[in-house]
Amino acid sequence: MFESIPAAPADPILGLADLYKSDLRPNKINLGIGVYKNETGHTPVMVSVKKAEQQLLETETSKNYLSIEGYTAYAQASQRLLFGAGNPILETQCLNTAQTPGGTGALRVAADFLAQHTTAKRIWVSNPSWPNHHNIFTASGLDVATYTYYQPETHTLDFTAMLNALESAEAGDVVLLHGCCHNPTGIDPTLEQWQQLSELMLRKSLLPLFDFAYQGLGQGLDDDAQGLRLFAQSHQEFIVCSSYSKNFGLYNERAGAFTLKTTTPQAGSAAFSQVKAVIRANYSNPPSHGASIVTTILHDDTLRAIWEQELLEVRQRIQRMRQLFVQTLQEKGAIQDFSFINKQNGMFSYSGLTKEQVTRLREEFAIYAVASGRINIAGMTPENMSRLCESIINVTR
Ligand code: LMR
């Protein structure tokens, strides 16, 4: 039965992480997978997380199953973080949140729920996007269409093309939007553009699905949510899939959230019961540890202040590396103008490097980037910057 199964292609991001691990060259640089690294190239456990874990170690009394939707306190904290404490939406009883295994888990719950319990048949995903979006939605049986997002000559958002593509969507289609720090381009809509998108999607009855995996890594926790919060003012129905992998550094704990906004509380109860049925048939109920950490931190003023400070440092380090990268490329005589990188948000940058240049960087210089040219700015350090920029200049000459 298993003999004739062909091998699956390596995952464009996680496959690269495996390649990196097996590379024995001592000066290798990893700009592939979207994981934060500090100034010494290490992915640390945040101090706030360690402190929360200490508390949990002392207070946890059971490893009993959680309910299908996970912790209520986690759901509440997640909603407050998404929409901002004091946002009237929190009082509508039209929001239901399920704790999920990471943002990917939330997206898969969303995809299964949409495919099985709504009339939605098609989801629009930006071109380019995180490659796993296609896998997840296709696996759930949705058709995936793409909208243009990126203008390669100017390294900017091709907003006109984006609007034109979405004009051809049909009522009831779903549109996936990256809440902030667009993966892979690092280019986000402005507030005015969010407004236009919101109006277009209302007019055409398109369902917004926010993938919100980088809150706090762009401009700040509230600023990064401006698009989502603007949509929430006028859209009665939408879904948010959020993640704590990056902003809490909880990658391997798999802490994410699926949030459903319905028109009425009654519709919310019925729809969310189907969401729970989807979860039960998938992974039954979520893992506890990561979500307990997030809940502990977000419900404790002292820990929250420590976490916000740590997140600020993450954000500032990435911004410093962006600037140093552009400056070092310039100083070392790069022919191309890379200053557009300073305008991008979050961990990623769409560098403009071609697939061939990315391959040469890996093979000749032990520098790992995604084949699309996406580079993880958080993989840069003051130590590796010179060699990195010299190598890029070498392959782009
Ligand atoms: C990435 O885009 O590199 C991250 O979201 C990690 C992943 O799962 O692909």
Image (tube, grey):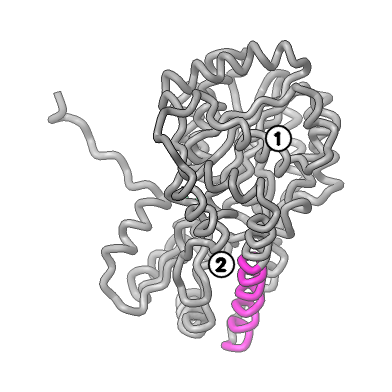
Precedes in sequence: disc 2 or disc 1:
1
Q: In the displayed structure, would residue 361 be above or below residue 293?
A: below
The residue to which callout 2 is attached is 377
Residue 56 visible at all: yes
Q: Amino acid at mark 2?
A: Ile
Q: Amino acid at mark 1?
A: Ala
Residue 22: % across, % down: 26, 64
Residue 86 among those drawn in magenta: no
Q: Residue at x 29, y 39 (%)?
A: 8
Magenta-colored span: 313-332
Q: Residue at x 65, y 82 (%)?
A: 327
- Classified by dominant secondary structure, the portion drawn in magenta counts as helix
Q: Quadrant of residue 121?
A: top right
Q: Does residue 325 appear to the left or right of 391 in the view shown?
A: right
Looking at the image, which is closer to me, 253 or 238?
253
Q: Quadrant of residue 73?
A: top right
Q: Residues within 10 Å of mark 2 (few under 14, many from 20)?
A: many
Label drawn at residue 13: none
- Number of disc labels: 2
Q: Are marks 2 and 1 in contact (CB under 8 Å)?
A: no
Disc 2 Cβ-to-ligand 1 distance below 8 Å: no
The residue to which callout 1 is attached is 165
Separation of residues labelled 2 and 1 (CA atoms): 30 Å
Q: In the displayed structure, would residue 328 be above or below residue 346?
A: below
Q: Does residue 358 appear to the left or right of 203 in the view shown?
A: left
Per the image, label 1 sits on a secondary structure element best described as: helix
Q: Residues within 10 Å of mark 1 (few under 14, many from 20)?
A: some
Q: Residue at x 29, y 76 (%)?
A: 25
Looking at the image, which is closer to me, 270 or 170?
270
Residue 325: % across, % down: 60, 77
